[in-house]
Amino acid sequence: MSGSPQTPLVIDLTRLLSRIGKRFSGIDRVEFEYLRFLKEQGETYGLLRTRWGYLLVDQSGMQRLYPLIAPQWAGRSLAKWRVLAQLRFFAVTRARFSTLNKALLRLFPNGFCYLNVGHSALSASFFATLRSAGCQEIRIMIHDVIPLSYPEYQRPETIVKFEKGFMAALEFADQIIVTTRSEKAQVVAATNKRNLRLPSLLQAPLGSDHFSPPNGGDGAETSSSPFVILGTIEPRKNHSLLLDIWSSPSRPNAELVIVGARGWRNEEVFRRLDAGIDGVSERNGVSDAELVQLLRHSRALLFPSFAEGFGLPAVEAARMGVPIICSDIPVFRELLGDYATYIDPHDRDGWAEAIRLAETQESVTRSHFSATDWSSHFELVFKVS
């Protein structure tokens, strides 16, 4: 960002605060990348909803907050209350919801812009409070509308909560940021279905340079190279298809490594994992460094998902040169192009054959892949020159 923005920017960091001590999800990592960038840019502030009310930290506070929330803390026993105590100490403003508008008016008498990239605090009452506090622009990133488009994979309470937040965003946002053409079409369809106002849309692909590029290490497959599936163990990710393949008499010789926490509405998959399947292992709490090494030495990253918003892990793995076998769904076609092998997520035989071929090849040709980096993403979002 060249110079300070004309209007102070307030980014909502509430989601990150809730993730202290936990491994970051894709959306968590996006919000963290925004914190990493904005803590060095002009007149920026971070807003956090806590048990005591709202805290606002200035640029100096964001710089102090950054190491407290950094992913290397994930899985450690860093008490959340200790971070909250420090936040209260260096916050420039503390306010209850009932007094938040007055506090923001005092601090920003000439107005401010609000940015939310974490799917948190999406409520009509909160946005109305921002407007009453002189907020000139509300910008919201919608990562996906999967709870609305694929409710069969969601908990009922998740669907209700997301729809309320989505409708509040449509009512109050000046701009909705989307990350792919596929998701843009989904947002438009969901808006039209509800006969609601459609704010301005900005398409800005996410950065994929979180992990080191392929020349950072040896990624050659060996006879012991595993297949990897990465992500929360939930119905949408379709782990059951892979468990069926590894449970069959002609199962692959290579190990299947499942990286990700157990999610929801997937009791049958959890039961099968608890009972044990030869050649299948679960790993949770894996550090970024460990994950990079696992992917570099993997046979392929498997993504049999029924639906994805962006599929950031697949893009990052492709950038590292890791072979990808994934579902034949629009978002993967858009992001991965000719790089990946595509199979219908319902085609168990097709997946088994693709895995067999990947396993029997002595080496997999890794074609060139290029994707957006975070600098390019921020250039689009903030019109950086």
Image (cartoon, rainbow, N blue to C red):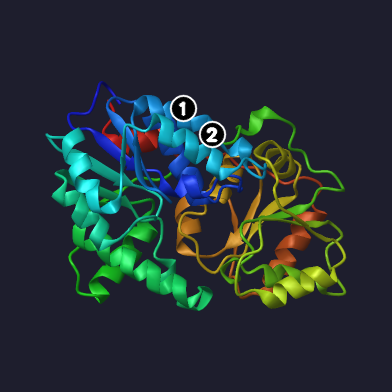
Viewer-closest of 116 and 96: 96
| Crowd rating for badge 1 (residues with CA inside 10 Å; few <14, some 14–19, many 20+) | some
* Residue where numbered disc 2 is placed: 68
Viewer-closest of 12 and 29: 12
Instruction: Name the side, left or right, on which 42 lies relative to 220.
Output: left
Residue for point 87% across, 48% down: 223
Residue for point 59% across, 53% down: 340
Residue for point 60% across, 60% down: 326
Task: Confirm or deny contact between disc 2 and disc 1 (CB under 8 A).
Answer: yes
User: Can residue 371 be seen in the rendering of this structure?
Assistant: no
Q: In the image, what residue type sits under mark 1?
A: Arg
Query: Residue 366 at what x, y percent from top left?
Result: 65, 42
Secondary structure, mark 2, is helix
Quadrant containing the C terminus is: top left
Quadrant containing the N terminus is: top left
Query: Residue 345 at what x, y percent from top left?
Result: 60, 70
Q: Which mark is residue 356?
A: none
Instruction: Name the side, left or right, on which 107 lies relative to 189.
Output: left
Secondary structure, mark 1, is helix
Q: In the image, what residue type sits under mark 2?
A: Leu
Residue 351 position (above or below residue 215): below
* Residue where numbered disc 1 is placed: 64
